[in-house]
Image (cartoon, rainbow, N blue to C red):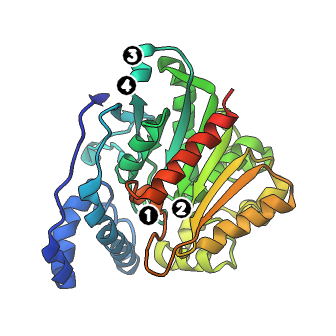
Amino acid sequence: MMNTMSTPYSLTCPDLDTLTMERDDLDCAIAPIARYWTEIDDDLRSVGAEQAAKIRRLRLDTAEFDYPRAAYWHDPESVDVIADVPYRADGGYDRAHGQVRGHLLDLYLPHAAIVSGGATLPVYIDVHGGGFCYGYKELNRNFCTHLAALGFAVFSLNYRPAPQTDLRGQLADIQDALRWIRANLDRFPVNPDAVFLTGDSAGACLALLTMAIERDADAAQAFGAPRPSELPIAGGALISGVYDVTGASPMRERLTATLGARFFAGLDAAQPFLSPAALVSRCPLPPLYLQTSSDDFIEAETLALATSLSVHGCDFELHDEKVPSTRTLGHVFPVCMTWLEESEQVLARMQRFAYRLSR
């Protein structure tokens, strides 16, 4: 069922007492609110106690960062929301009856585009981040609605977080969402030839791999997607991404320690596509916009991808925000803090990037 909203939403204002709470009390205070945008522990019964504890801890620690920002989340009044659309038949919130929250998407549209009609609005499809195990589309709703306000239709995707599935399963979910979008684009006032992917952190990794799957038959086969959606992707905007998840990379080791080795199961044939250098050399990627900052803890991942793109003569632009010692932007700042001047500049550049490539 589609839920259309046109009014801003808000969440509970942060309680400043949380700044001095003990860890257990803080967890109890934040968890009920954070469930609006992420799983906490309801999906951890299928894994061992040690792994469940690690995933729960990561989720709560990340939610602690997002919690004070939630008070600033809102929908611009110029944007209409179509929420909780199932892109698979089992999409929904009723877990007891087999529904899967990870199989829902939202669509955010400028109200003016709905009123005027036509089929000219460029499209962004957003894949949220969260270390492959944290977050749902609600985590990025504020970012996506503000992007929509700049003149885009924005589809925001859920996918099943680990441990509900593995990397191949997450990519399969995204493929299913893209198929739904491709089949339904003509229902909305959008330009089907101006579709762009965007993603942040782990979502940027999933977006990059999705572009490889869509454009390279070997990549599609290696990730278990021999029949991609064939949705034409005109470009990608990747923010603070993790891109090197080869077996020997530090990030792969870190992710495996939290998610378990099973998350990367069945990827032997995909190893050449898990390194940015190898992926870029093999796959004809569309134009890319890359964003990071000097205080992003994985800044080097974006710079390494940019280097590979440069070596192979690819069409891309790189923006690495230099942060003075008296300020903090940090990881995925344009997504989690859209109200910053630097974030507004990123959104404006993403608009120019997509409009330049729209036809």
Q: Nearer the viewer, mark 2 or mark 1?
A: 2
Q: CA distance from mark 4 to mark 3?
A: 6 Å
- In the picture shown, does residue 208 fall above or below 332? above
- Please tell me which residue is depicted at 27% across the width and 42% down the height of the picture: 97
- Please tell me which residue is depicted at 79% across the width and 57% down the height of the picture: 280
The reply to whether discs 3 and 2 touch (Cβ–Cβ < 8 Å) is no
The reply to whether discs 4 and 3 touch (Cβ–Cβ < 8 Å) is yes
Whether residue 210 is visible here, answered yes or no, is yes
- In the picture shown, does residue 332 fall above or below 4? below
Q: Secondary structure at mark 1?
A: loop
Q: Which residue is mark 1?
A: 133
Q: Which residue is mark 4?
A: 111
Q: CA distance from mark 2 to mark 1?
A: 9 Å
Query: Image quadrant of residue 33?
Result: bottom left
Q: Nearer the viewer, mark 3 or mark 1?
A: 3
Circle count: 4
Q: Which residue is mark 3?
A: 115
Q: Which residue is mark 2?
A: 202
Question: Residue 312: x percent and y percent?
Answer: 86, 57
Q: CA distance from mark 4 to mark 1?
A: 33 Å
Q: CA distance from mark 3 to mark 1?
A: 38 Å
Foreground of the two, 242 or 359: 359
